[in-house]
Amino acid sequence: MSFGSRSMLLAPEVGRERAGTDVPEDTATLPEESGRQALVTLPSMSTGLTELPERGFENLLVVSPWAPDRVESALRDRGVPVGNCGLIPVNGSPVRYDGPLWTTEAVSPADLTGLSMRYCEAMRHVEPGEGWVLIDNVQVLLMYVDADRAVRLLDRLTRQARERDVTGVVAVDRSAVETRTLATLGQLVGTVVER
């Protein structure tokens, strides 16, 4: 896997819409089939990195408000190869990092266009049929933008992962998000896992 290219590429939006009657499956485990998308509701101060199966770390893109050093530490705690992972830091401050993670420039949680652009670029390095993407702690987006805008972005990102045949996980602190928003997020994916 190579997380090295730094050029920007806007991918066209393709994908299927979920039918309005599709109900996400509630389960205790993440689906590992390529292209499947899941919502994981977590307790406060948690990360979706603790929920991924071992094979999820073989080719992983993480979108997270956590600093790169903290993500690297969490990956090392899991005993996984850090060099197989890329990170889009969702943080309003510039990020200085010189470690094994491939990282983009930090993007403000209020800059949904910038986040979408970085995601499109980074997804080129996630292998179809093998790769995983974790959009972690999405409640941070909801602190900066309207819930409808955040949901539209997450819909676009999960559809892109599905169409690329990449397994995706959207992780959220269940205590930081309204029940209605959680239900809406659940409709974007095929599976909801509660921790």
Image (cartoon, rainbow, N blue to C red):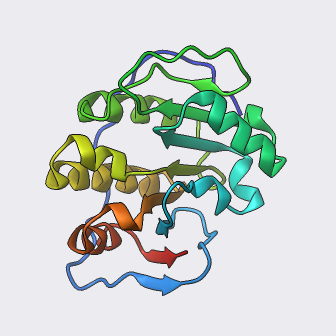
* Res 14 visible: no
- Give me the residue at 26% from left, 35% from top: 112
**Nearest the camera: 190 or 185?**
185
Q: How many numbered marks does the figure carry?
A: 0
Q: Name the side, left or right, on which 66 lies relative to 82.
A: left
* Res 46 visible: yes
Measured as percent of width and height from the top left, residue 71 is found at: 63, 38
**Nearest the camera: 140 or 175?**
175
Q: Quadrant of the N terminus?
A: top right
Measured as percent of width and height from the top left, residue 23 is found at: 33, 85
Q: Quadrant of the C terminus?
A: bottom right
- Give me the residue at 59% from left, 73% from top: 31
Q: Quadrant of residue 99?
A: top right
**Nearest the camera: 19 or 26?**
26
Measured as percent of width and height from the top left, residue 146 is found at: 15, 48
Q: Quadrant of residue 174?
A: bottom left
Q: Vertical placement of 51 versus 47: above or below?
A: below
- Give me the residue at 44% from left, 15% from top: 94
Q: Name the side, left or right, on which 182 lies relative to 120.
A: left
Q: Vertical placement of 78 versus 85: above or below?
A: below
